[in-house]
Image: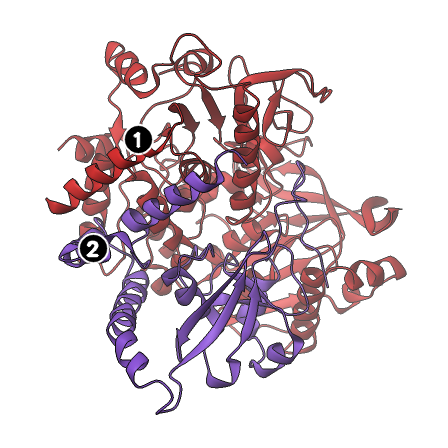
Chain colours: A red, B purple
Amino acid sequence: MAICQARAWLSRGLTTLSSHPSLRVCVVGSGPAGFYTAEKMIKAHEGAFVDIIDRLPTPFGLVRSGVAPDHPETKIVTNQFSRVAQHERCSFYGNVTLGSAVTLSELRELYDVVVLAYGAESDRALGIPGEDLSGIHSAREFVWWYNGHPDYRNLNPDLKSTDTAFILGQGNVALDVARILLRPTAELATTDIADHALTALEQSSIRKVFLIGRRGPVQAACTAKELREVLGIKNLHIHINQTDLEKNQEDEEELKNNRIRRRIYDLLSKEAASGPSVPTSGQHELHFIFFRKPERFLDSLDRIGHVTAVQFEKTVLKAVGPGKQIAVGTGQFEELESGLVLKSIGYKSVPVDGLPFDQQKGLVPNVGGRVLSDASRDPTMLQKGLYVCGWLKRGPTGIIATNLYCAEETVGSILEDLQQGAIGSTSSIVKKPGREGLLQLLSDRNIEFVPFSRWQKIDAEERSLGSLRNKPREKLTTWEDLMKVAKE
Amino acid sequence: MLFPRLSRIGIKIFRELYGGKFTVPLCRTGSALEHYSGCWRPQFELHPEAKTFQSVIFQKHHQLSTTAAVSDAADGKKEKETISVTFVDKDGDEKQIEVPVGMSMLEAAHQNDIELEGACEGSLACSTCHVIVMDMEYYNKLEDPTDEENDMLDLAFGLTETSRLGCQVIAQPELDGIRLALPVATRNFAVDGYVPKPH
């Protein structure tokens, strides 16, 4: 009670202290980019009222549906995000989809500032024959499936008809996927992995996983922690071709200038030099395949429409600039058999109506987070009051902390624009309705939004279900269950 | 910046109410102290690891606030239980604090209202508490970073030869007088993604 009074007093104190008119801010997307934006905004401007909307009933974006279940430490950042969501000048509204529940132009009418931080919910394609055969999934779909994203609980990847899985790509997502496929399920059973995924993995017949990259070990896009982890899986035979580790002049140059690459290369070399070259019986296997470019997926003869093999072209590196080498085909081809292919070649953002979008780069054209009207990046063509942060702003790369700096930059741009009178209530005659306006609109449309307090019900339910099974949480994985618990 | 002074007050109040683990000048008077410990308590279930971490901080915080007066009185008599640490922020402003021996620089920064992020709360799963040891002499006094710390440092923005994670630097008597800089990473943060400087 006294705390509430103290808070009220403090907030009153703030209002009188602050000579700033209020600033109504809407952040779309509640992943790291969204939450860091909200946090920085609230800290930087005492008049800022921030509403975060998300299309899911659950917050935290990829921290919930992207970070691997066996990485609980990485998810601790949700504590910080939860404190932000409960700040008196911040609100979270889940189950509110931009583009259907509310349009971008409506949001821009309602708020002084709209920051789009909804990430990348689609995938880059290889654009090669056979890509739509069954048995081929994007790594994103597979990750969302094992992480219990309600849109992918029914993915049902077939893990029983083949003993071999190909993962195309060698970044951290690829390594996460490999680890989930190869790790003893007893170890996964104590994580917050989705129940349906755990069951499928327990029955999985996958014994060999191939991590396949177009370039060499010097160019592998993963980080050391993830590589160390996958190399450390119990009772796993690792195969790396010694000859792939040979370096050319440009490789040496690349390593010299890049600490991460250097450490990755060292880990791979050490692994290749140690260990037996043939697996013992019953051992699972992980093969690092370098210098292979997928050319086409081959259809199965006895299971029409299902992938049975992949044709690869061998590649060599070609220098195209200082410190940059690309893979070029050699005209030599080979076919390798696998009944499961996971493409881990990058996420892709999806535009909404009324949003300038650079199709080629798969992001919103912007300068320091300020949205530009077209991809030519003419800085005079600014979209007033519209900003981006996170993957939508800079493409699908980086770690959670990257968003910290990304948000700092976007918020910096907002403050600058505010100072120059380009945005904010001081420059407009009519005050923006902000939260009240949004809630009115949602109520008119019968949208059942999920505020943070209702997410906490979901959270509590998941933790309590999890405690029965010795898991940190048992995720609710259907829209129905999520909404039911939220409404209880 | 727009309202530097006011925004500082804002940050302070924000932290007092929500950050929890910070020293609270406003709450210090009279019975407000109890309220402080009340407003500290998180309103949601914490991750097990995080819980341990927070309780450690909480205990240490108490230790700090109750022993402050004692150590004042006993000053000079017995061996020093705290060391002096100077943080240099992004704008070059310095803040000198006393840190109890055994406490990590991450915890110390948070207790003293120093803007050091700590996304994973000291569980060695992120790089946000990156600090730069300003004197090589002090850097060499530290134990070498473990593989795990190096894995995270790989991803730190503005990495230098004397970079460490604040959660892994623990106050020891020989570190008395150490100076730590918070990295300046945001200045060059390009639209197309910032590439950490290799070393």
* Picture coordinates of residue B163, whole percent (x, y): 61, 67
Q: For residue B36, which numbered disc appears in the image?
A: 2
Examine the image and state in which quarter residue B54 appears: bottom left
Q: For residue A469, which numbered disc appears in the image?
A: none
- Compared with residue A156, is residue A424 higher up or lower down, i.e. above or below? above
Residue B123 visible to the viewer: no
Which chain is mark 2 on?
B
| Along the viewing direction, whichever of B92 and A361 lies nearer the viewer | B92
Q: Is residue B137 left or right of residue A460?
A: right
* Picture coordinates of residue A330, whole percent (x, y): 86, 46
- Compared with residue B143, is residue A438 higher up or lower down, i.e. above or below? above
Q: Are labels 1 and 2 assigned to the same chain?
A: no
Residue at screen point 42% across, 36% down: A38
Tell me which amino acid carries mark 2. Answer: Tyr
Residue A476 visible to the viewer: yes
Which residue lies under the disc numbered 1? Answer: A15
Which chain is mark 1 on?
A
